[in-house]
Amino acid sequence: MNFKRKALDDVDLNLTPLIDVVFLLLIFFMVTTTFEQETQLKIELPQASGEHKKAVKSLTVSIDSENRFFINQKEVVNSGLETIKKALKQEAGDKENPPLLISADAQATHQSVMTVLDAAGQLGFVNITFAANEPPTKE
């Protein structure tokens, strides 16, 4: 008797369909992703007309109608000047004079806005912008 072993064929794993599926998933996620920054706070901005500026990455200080402060969507513990300064400094990190956007509700007190301006001034921020809605046009 002749007991010769048969040569085994090499087993291949075809990765082409897997790569195709990964590319399709990548395209799907790229198309369905939104890059819009939506706020979770309900703020009624005051109206003002003026020139439009391009949106840039900035620190955002929001003041709601109950005079609560939010820096980049994180609520500040209290409304004290030192607390706001500390929170601004922490959010700015090691950035040198980042742009600051103040979004204050139309019902927020003037003192709340002045507190944020005072804190920003003491920290040396000079690039400060206010958010506002455009008034409706009369036709």
Image (cartoon, helix red, strand yellow):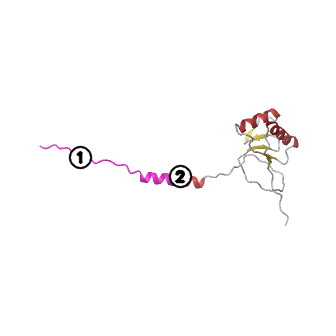
Viewer-proximal residue among 32 and 93: 93
| Mark 1 or 2, nearer chain start | 1
Residue under label 2, please give it.
26
Q: Is residue 80 in view from this perspective?
A: no
What residue sits 83% from the left and 51% below the top? 46
Query: Does the segment drawn in magenta span residue 124?
Result: no
Q: Is 50 situated left or right of 98 in this image? A: right
Which residue appears farthest toward the left when viewing the image? 1
Query: Does the segment drawn in magenta span residue 26?
Result: yes
> What number is the disc on residue 128?
none
Q: Is mark 1 on a helix, strand or loop?
A: loop
Residue under label 1, please give it.
7
User: Which of the 4 quarters of the picture holds residue 138?
Assistant: bottom right
What residue sits 54% from the left and 55% below the top? 27
CB under 8 Å between discs 1 and 2:
no
Q: Quadrant of the N terminus?
A: top left
User: Which of the 4 quarters of the picture holds residue 115?
Assistant: top right
Residue 82 location in percent, x, y? 80, 32
Distance, label 1 to label 2, CA atoms, is 41 Å
Q: Quadrant of the C terminus?
A: bottom right
What residue sits 79% from the left and 41% below the top? 125
Residue 93 location in percent, x, y? 70, 37
Question: Residue type at mark 2?
Answer: Leu
> Which range of residues does the magenta coloring cover?
1-28
Viewer-proximal residue among 39 and 48: 48
Q: Is residue 32 in view from this perspective?
A: yes
